[in-house]
Image (spheres, coloured by chain):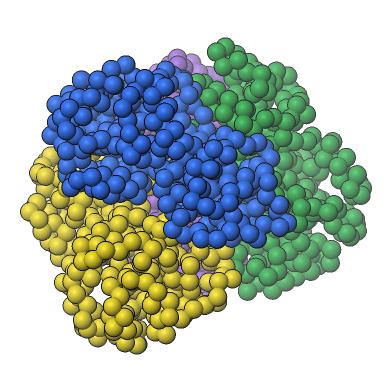
Chain colours: A green, B blue, C yellow, D purple
């Protein structure tokens, strides 16, 4: 079994750190107590940081605001990397004309699509007259009537052959100590199953998320992969993705993975972090 | 390529026929014109018939009533075999005490659970006090709020370890010439994906559906598997299931599988009917 | 958690018992010590027994001989039910002409195909002249060169559209306390993955295996499903299949599922036996 | 339907082109006639080129030599990007000590592992004494006895929890106009299925392959994603991967995807190239 380490003494050996959000910085109760101090420790050491989160519901600015409301001060917009930013980049590069249909909130759509194309919520699509729609995005689990709009999505996609992307590949997210909510990545899998297709998914563990953060980081200095520590609470997203991209990985036990089952989860998944720590507090 | 045959001259060689409902007897517009005459032809030949349908929303009696409203007269209750009947049998044999929670309409629950146990719709479960619930059933796609009750189902099943069954394994069903609706079998796959579990599913192509119909048929005479022709419009349910159970199978082109793509569908799936006919009309 | 019971005091309440072979009667070292006495206890109580095993390598007679060599006396041929018998029944009912190609040993082929059709090992197929072959069977993991014959199987099946069946759906089987061997069910999944098809699989947990044993049992008396106890060491085959068929199920801890992880395996799989016992010895 | 274009008039609008190898430059008969002229056309236009191939059996130098033997002159080592190079990078970054066990040829191992660690073919592993092995690599389908070494791999990986990587994710590769051979990516899926794990896979369609080529390309100039055209014959690898990475994509009909089924393949997969051309010849 991998021995536990201290986060602070481990992160010192790196020039940059990528931090997952839920389970590392915050949990269902709010900010994890003591995280502000750890972030300041990182900054004091001159270590660059980025927060990598599978989320397409908010802009970088809104993410920073949410952290501030929770009590975490001083995060900068450019330190936030979301799966929604990858979706936006894809749409900017690949979709030049037409409207973009989506499942999600109007806020998520206005952020993802702010580069100019018109967004149409599924509820407003006219199935008989939808040729002007050039892509479909699964954005967020909120903002629509599941009974009506999931069925409408299925039928729209059966009739139209166009690029379909999922802006957050997570199946679910925690909403309390016990409970979760189905995320848009889970809803997209239902539609995939009915259509017998696979859509383009963005978010950890996919390498593209790490590459995006890595490229962006290198705009403000020179970093090799070996200079970066990925920190997360989930083996299948944070650790798997970090490992594959070639980063050193540190699993914290303050979120999805708990001390009592970390060993069996590592053994059954075959996903092995380089380090394990209780949290980023020590 | 398999040559097309006449249904009537083929069915003559069998002592019994199993008929799928949608695509064989009816379609989105109602009863397929001429089906009444074909059913009478079958009866005149002394051939026993059963209708096998993946559906848990209605009782046998209600199924007969729906056919009568569409204009098909003379079907008997005992000639209807639904996947809901298998779910009911499972619950009768395996669940002796407690309440049974479900997703679906009250009508579907009252039918499936009429043997005595109390049914609780997911909306009425108290997550903090649910120890008296001894099984969970995915019954029907209607009768509940998807946003609220799918999430509640996920959290109920995360907290409780109990038998979970799916009373209709179909992912979707046709509602018009172009469009479909997600069936409860599709919704159950979303929950399976979030929980990373596989539930117990009833319905074609599973052998148990054919076995149920076969056993029931043999209560009214002596039939070998070789005496029975399975007729359906869908390769992955009717034909695959019939083949595996050891029946001769006839694919009709009056439903899901169309003349223009039947050959490519057979080749890509590897599911090969013994016979192909345009419909059961000739 | 389900409390442990005594097998003997539990089985007394049933008219018949279905026993898995590996992990219940024998293990990698041979017969489980004391099993002879348990079998005699079952017979003394007037309880009918059947051994249900996913295996297509040996006939019923050969299975009895193997048990006798291990030291278990008195099993009768008709008490053995193998997945190979289901494959044979399928071929008898569905394939009337032509040759049957197979992966496996000559012994397995001679047993499965003894009803008359000619068997051709994959190694002997002429890819350029194979129109007389009317079905393909995955029989056994032994008896062929994997490098050469798996590739040849892939290419034969790419060129020919015919019924493909898997006579033992298990992915692997134990060969020692630590080690396993890939079974023909595992090899069939490799070919399925390359061809992007699903073949027809026989064996537990599929209902058809239980139905076959149930029908056969009822040739020698009258048994309802509620009269039968299924005993096995594996949740995903014995217990899942028994539960779905409507039998009461008893998990023994003398094989694949061990006392130290039974609870976590039940929780993560959602497959719940009615009873748990250490073994069939007490 | 997307109209067909001329490759040459399309590629003119880009600063760089990524070319798949099989189906674009060569086929089972050797070099596609006329390809030399197209490569020269690309160079004459001042367009940078890279060849992206899922292959871990040969070094860049050996790849260039093979092309030269086939008759394609002038490719440079640095223009070749293989999935094996990604596997090598992963091992260099993540595995610092110990030996690396592998399935494949000695040549593939010597190339992938040339940075220093000792390579051990599976055949030479001592299962009872293997603690000095720190990673496992699926390299190539040749160079080992499948019956013996696939089983040994399964048992080695059941006993040891270590990073497992697949250096070529393809399931199969063409060996003639009709026939294919199972690739190491296919064999790795068999082992995944037995172990119930997912390994780390390298190769198209994964973004990491495109990122590697993109980063490397940018060492010799400045290229945005919008400056690059990805050309391939396979929707699920070349086109899906290129689309997701944000490149414009061109499907050629000189390999896996043929003119007669291109439309149905695009519709059923939902993978839509930006352009379609018969080949790169015109």
Q: Which residue sits furthest top?
A: A129
Can the viewer see residue A87 in this picture?
A: no
Q: From the top left corner, tell me how far across and down residue A84 is, in percent.
A: 70, 36
Vertical position of residue B248 compared to residue D103: above or below: above
Q: Nearer the viewer, residue C258 or A170?
A: C258
Residue at image point 55% right, 61% down: B97
A233 sits left or right of D163 in the view: right
Residue at image point 22% right, 55% down: C87
Q: Nearer the viewer, residue D62 or D164?
A: D164
Vertical position of residue A64 compared to residue D144: above or below: above
Q: From the top left corner, tell me how far across and down residue A171 is, in percent.
A: 63, 45
Can you say which quadrant of the picture contains the C terminus of chain D? top left
Q: From the top left corner, tell me how far across and down residue A53 is, in percent.
A: 73, 45
Q: Quadrant of residue D28?
A: top left
Residue at image point 48% right, 66% down: C273
Can the viewer see residue B158 in this picture?
A: yes
Q: Nearer the viewer, residue A28 or A254?
A: A28
Can you say which quadrant of the picture contains the N terminus of chain D? top left
Q: Quadrant of residue C30?
A: bottom left
Residue at image point 40% right, 58% down: C246
Q: Nearer the viewer, residue A206 or C256?
A: C256
B5 sits left or right of D62 in the view: left
Query: Could you tell me how many numbered marks the image carries?
Result: 0
Q: From the top left corner, tell me how far across and down residue A207 is, in percent.
A: 62, 46
Vertical position of residue A28 compared to residue A90: above or below: below
């Amino acid at each position: 079994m991998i021995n536990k380490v201290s986060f602070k003494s481990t992160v010192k050996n790196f020039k940059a750190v990528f931090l997952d959000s839920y389970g590392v910085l915050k949990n269902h109760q709010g900010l994890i107590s003591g995280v502000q101090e750890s972030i300041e420790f990182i900054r004091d050491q001159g270590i660059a940081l980025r927060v990598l989160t599978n989320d397409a519901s908010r802009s970088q600015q809104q993410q920073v605001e949410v952290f501030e409301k929770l009590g975490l001060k001083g995060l900068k917009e450019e330190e936030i990397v979301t799966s929604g930013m990858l979706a936006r980049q894809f749409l900017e590069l690949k979709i030049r004309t037409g409207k973009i249909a989506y499942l999600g909130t109007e806020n998520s759509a206005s952020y993802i699509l702010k580069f100019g194309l018109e967004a149409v919520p599924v509820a407003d699509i006219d199935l008989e007259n939808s040729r002007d729609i050039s892509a479909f995005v699964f954005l967020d689990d909120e903002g629509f009537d599941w009974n009506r709009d999931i069925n409408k999505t299925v039928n729209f996609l059966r009739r139209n052959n166009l690029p379909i992307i999922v802006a957050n590949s997570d199946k679910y997210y925690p909403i309390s100590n016990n409970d979760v909510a189905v995320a848009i990545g889970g809803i997209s899998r239902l539609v995939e199953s009915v259509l017998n297709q696979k859509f383009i998914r963005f978010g950890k563990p996919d390498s593209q998320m790490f590459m995006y953060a890595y490229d962006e980081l290198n705009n403000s200095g020179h970093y090799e992969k070996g200079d970066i520590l990925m920190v997360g609470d989930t083996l299948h997203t944070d650790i798997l993705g970090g490992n594959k991209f070639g980063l050193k990985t540190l699993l914290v036990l303050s979120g999805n993975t708990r001390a009592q089952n970390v060993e069996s989860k590592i053994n059954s998944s075959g996903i092995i972090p380089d380090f394990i720590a209780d949290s980023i507090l020590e």
